[in-house]
Amino acid sequence: MTAAVELQITDVAFGGKGVAHANGKAVFVPYVIDGETVSASITREHKKFLEAELESIVTASPHRVEPRCPYFGRCGGCVYQHIDYERQLALKWRQVKETLRRIGGLKEPPMRPFIPSPIEYEYRNRITVHVRDGAVGFFRRESNKLLDIERCPIALNEVNAQLAELRGSRPRDGHYTLRASAAPRVFTQANDAVAAAMLDLVDRLLGSATGTLIDAYCGAGFFSKRLRGRFGKVIGIDWDQHAIAVAREDANENETYVAVDVETELGARLQSIAPASDGGNSAVIADPPATGLSKMILETLIEHRPTQLVYVSCNPATLARDLVTLKQSFRIDSITPLDMFPQTAEIEVVADLHA
Ligand SMILES: C[S@@+](CC[C@H](N)C(=O)[O-])C[C@H]1O[C@@H](n2cnc3c(N)ncnc32)[C@H](O)[C@@H]1O
């Protein structure tokens, strides 16, 4: 640790760290806000950048607020509790735009306004906690050590009641996903209000699309259940057999759900639909995990070119990487960020692409 230096924070980068400059290098400092002057100590020196820890605020931003969680600053979960909500959204919006410019090579990404979360705390309908040597909680920031947590203020009260119950039950070491009452034990969107807004958005974006809908990475059919009424045929693909079993429970005649790898299935399914140039009409929703789409999936989408592709991403960096390839064959009509996880660095983004 070196002596404290004074830094002017010029930006907050994706991931949550503030950006400043010293000795001709960028310096990354957590828990600060653009526009602030802070005193910080340099903790690591890399070839191209420095890392620092906040010592004190010299000039505070008008957007600085009191964090609600006693673990904030130590817990690896939230990074923005010290910033008012409107500013969090403005920063995240800029981060998406910059990521699409820098990685995606899009000069002017067609950004739409942020869809905010109507609830800023107490929104998470599920959390995964870890148990080790009697401690029950989340990993500490940038560490694999556990922080014992009694209550998580971004989780719903029902979820915190389950946490209290788990803590009282002397659980064995391991990982425990705690869910608000009736949620199935498969992937579900974590913020009900924003999930509903995302459904409305995808529904709107698909406009008057008909024909065949392929819901790739469909989980339990979150998107296809809403859209099945207007498509002649709906095909859901996910390799989680439990999720597919849930999706099949109330499937109509026009719905098919297959429990396989999207890589092995997507090409064959798209091939069976006539290409747009021959009057075929197909839409694909792709909602992959944070790693984004593989090279093979990207090639499949380019080769078969569905009429519309709605790409739902939980990682702007992999979305931007994938758009580099997709923009060769698709027109990008809009990019809409959604705040599924207020107080955290996470950003959900929906990109609307057309052949
Ligand atoms: C972000 S979730 C989306 C689920 C669903 N669209 C929803 O909104 O509830 C990603 C899903 O992709 C599935 N998955 C990940 N990689 C896959 C692959 N290579 N093939 C098929 N499914 C995959 C996971 O099982 C998970 O259900």
Image (tube, rainbow, N blue to C red):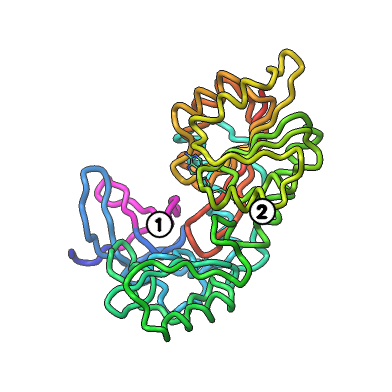
Note whether 242 is above or below 162 in the view shown. Answer: above
| Disc 1 target residue | 18
Residue plotted at (54% across, 26% down): 326
Query: In x, y percent, where is residue 15?
Result: 42, 54
Residue 310 part of the magenta-drawn span: no
Which residue corresponds to mark 2? 115
**Mark 1: which amino acid?**
Gly
**Mark 1 or mark 2: which is in front?**
2
For the magenta stretch, what is the residue range? 6-28
**Quadrant of the image for the C terminus?**
top right
Q: Nearer the viewer, residue 194 or 81?
A: 194
Left or right position of 310 against 344: right
Query: Which disc is residue 228 wearing?
Result: none
Amino acid found under the numbered disc labelled 2: Ile
What is the quadrant of residue 309 in the picture? top right
Of the pair 17 and 333, the residue shown nearer to us: 333
User: How far apart are labels 1 and 2 at the CA level?
Assistant: 23 Å
Q: List x then y, in percent, for residue 222.
A: 65, 50
Q: Earlier in the sequence, mark 1 or mark 2?
A: 1
* Residue at (67% x, 27% y) in the render: 354
Indicate the secondary structure of the residue bearing disc 1: strand
Q: Residues within 10 Å of mark 2 (few under 14, many from 20)?
A: some
Residue 23 located within the stretch drawn in magenta: yes
Q: What is the chief secondary structure element of the magenta stretch?
A: strand
Dot 2: element: loop
Q: Residue at x 53, y 45 (%)?
A: 96
Q: Is residue 71 left or right of residue 142?
A: right
